[in-house]
Amino acid sequence: MAIVIDGFVYASWIFVVALGLTLIFGVMKILNVAHGAFYSFGAYGAASLIGLYSQTGLPVAGEFVIILLSSAVIGLVLGYALERVLLRPMYGHDEVVLVLVSYAAFLMMEDVLRLIWGSDAYFAYQPFVAVGFVEIGELIVSNYDLMLVGFAITLGGAGWWLLNHSRFGHILTAVIHDREMATSFGVNVVKVFLITFILGAILGALGGAVTAPKVSVTPGMGVEVIVLAFAVVAIGGMGSITGAMIGALMVGLARAAAVHLLPEVELFAIYVVMAGVLVLRPEGLFTRVQARKI
Amino acid sequence: MWKLNSVMKTGSLAALVSLAFASAPMAQETMKVGVVGFLTGGASGPFGIPAQNAAELIIDAINNGDLPGAYATPGIGGLQVEPIYVDEAGGSTTQVTELRRLVQQQQVDAVVGYISSGSCLAVAPVAEELEVLTVLFDCGTPRIFEEASYRYVFRTAPHATMDNVGAALYAAGAMDGVNNYAGLNQNYAWGQDSWRDFSLVMQHLNPNANITKELFPKIFAGEYGAEISALLISRSDVLHSSFWGGDLESFIFQATARGLPLRLPMILTTGETVTFRLADKLPDGTIVGARGPHGVLANESELNTWFRAAYQERFGEAPTYPSYHMAQGFLGLKSAADAAAADVGGTPNTEEIIAAFEGLEFEAVGSTVKMALAGGHQAISETAYGTFRYNTDTGMPEIVDVVRYSAECVNPPEGQTSVEWLEAGMPGAICN
């Protein structure tokens, strides 16, 4: 029971972060290292605003609104700026160049983050503590974590609906499968790229914002999470939302099982799963060769 | 005319050369010191910044002769200190590169630094190779001098064995019957060594006690949900953790939100660093250490009174143990250099400072420090533990039920490694 609950909580957290990463890769073929910076900015933005809001004495529900709104604004601003200024001039270059550009962006954004917020930690524990916990057998589970599981499922469902049942989703699918053909049918691919990148940035910031109440928000926190997110995306298949969900679940359950049953191997349990999947399916679980999808 | 010009030029050149030589002693009136600590990353807030603040404070006081008592003479060995601050973030390889840069490009005379045990293990042999006097001020792994010996490297803070012996003695004394205990420590030298030492002492104190859970999450993991679940159902009496920095703060938030401290009290060997930062978010009843008698656990003295007041006035907050450790590093260096200067009757060189440093006993801010281990290169001191509680009347954190342990009680004797000493049941330990 504990392994399942812990696995789902961990999977939900990492799925929220990995979703934006796989979306951007699926549509734009960019392995966006700057996603870690979106995560950090989201965490800092939410932590700062929650800290200010909590001093007003207003209801805790407002802090959840802050988490959503702050990540939307941060993702919008950063995603728009990064796509227009750094990435757009690089379209058409090799994918490796785009990775390097996004890595450079990540380093610059980490420094900007320090300029804005400094080196000290920020705390935003209020919503995490306020919702309390529930006892399940011997286990005590945070309601915030359970809400996170629900939120991740909702987010995954929304992503699936957006792709399969909305006009924008159909356009995205067309761009994913054949960019040139979509262009010839009148799809404004540049605009689709911009919207996709902003969506991905918002999801990255959202990952940081939902994490902020649980942790000490410090510079460099994006570095740790981006490695995990890459592992999840690699397991599931680059660019696949379903893959990200399954990958996150595999990683979450593997880690939880290791902690409970064999703590000595916790550190590399995640990467054993990744290595195993990649040995059997080098392109990841949910990626068809020569047929990209998200 | 040509000859006259030539003579004038030669004369000017000679004058310049003599001026240059004349200015050489001027250059030696400062001692360049590399000061290394985390200025960015998760460890900067609770560790690196308080340490850097203390460095700034103590260096200014040393240069101006503002320190009280025996430290009132300006400078270190008569030389004004010129600090060069370096960020410890980036890992061991980066620190080795940075140390080489400090010595070969910046030409520092000494280095005072390093919070992470990983950094210390990496830089110690390089400092030896570069023949630069290096004072490790904070890192805790006993391995530094137990697996190698160094001439140019000193550590003015006691190592982690002291922290964990003190933690085990306090747990045994403060709690009725610790029969089951668990550990949560980071998966690298510091965490592994801390848990090893703690569990060895616990076995010595109560051979029937059981280890219920040994968890070693990755450093800077941030998310400890599964670990907390495992601890919740482990039926332990107490939890030992040497977590520090952002990891410690994140763990406390997550553990408190899930009621972990209600089931098993926590012993945090570096807990003092978060008492003021977290205040009422740190659960009452948490046993905290300060890696020596530092912060609110410091012994009263003129030096401590000055340090706390000056730090509070300059930085608007109370100093925590990383601040004390940094001050301790500089006071050790100053004591050695001043003693060497008195011996040689002038500015001492590195070899002379080393000779004075080995086996030195000096007054630090929180207690007396003896360079008693590793041929006089490793410090020991007394330590203290207490129980945290938040005083709702004053709105301030407090540490109560403080117990002090002598240096000879919690540190291994010279010539024995920590493991040898602990496995043998701490022979020769002189405890109150």
Image (cartoon, coloured by chain):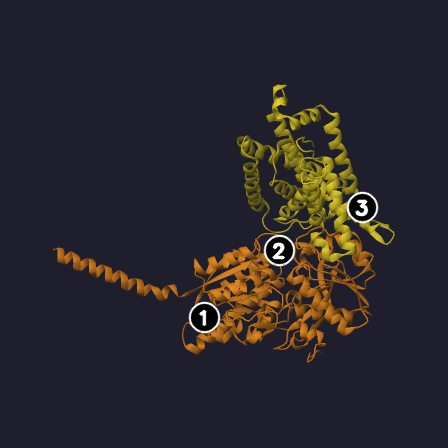
Chain colours: A yellow, B orange
Question: Amino acid type of disc 3?
Answer: Asn
Residue B365 appears in the figure: yes
**What chain is tagged by disc 2?**
B
The quarter of the image holding the N terminus of chain B is bottom left
Q: In the displayed structure, would residue A96 be above or below residue B141?
A: above
Q: Where is residue B66 shown, x and y percent of the image? A: 50, 67
Residue under mark 1: which chain is it in?
B
Task: Name the front one of labels 3 and 1.
Answer: 1
Amino acid type assigned to the residue bearing label 2 in the image: Ala
In this rendered view, identify the residue nearer to me: B312 or A249: A249
Quarter containing the C terminus of chain B: bottom right
Q: Position of residue B220 (x, y in %)?
A: 66, 53
Check disc 1 and report the residue beneath it.
B350
Residue at disc 2, secondary structure: loop
In the displayed structure image, the side of residue B25 where residue A44 appears, left or right: right
Mark 1 crowd level (few <14, some 14–19, many ≥20, 10 Å Cα):
some
Q: Residue furthest left?
A: B1
Name the residue tied to disc 3. A143
Identity of the amino acid at label 1? Thr
Position of residue B319 relative to residue A181, above or below, is: below
Callouts 3 and 2 close, C-beta under 8 Å: no
Q: Position of residue A114 (x, y in %)?
A: 57, 47
Question: What element does badge 3 sit on?
Answer: helix
SS for tag 1?
A: helix
As measured in the structure, the alpha-carbon distance from the residue carrying label 3 to the one carrying label 1 is 60 Å
Task: Tell me the number on the disc at residue A82.
Answer: none
**Labels 1 and 2 touching (C-beta < 8 A):** no
> What label does residue B43 carry, if any?
2
Q: Chain of mark 3?
A: A
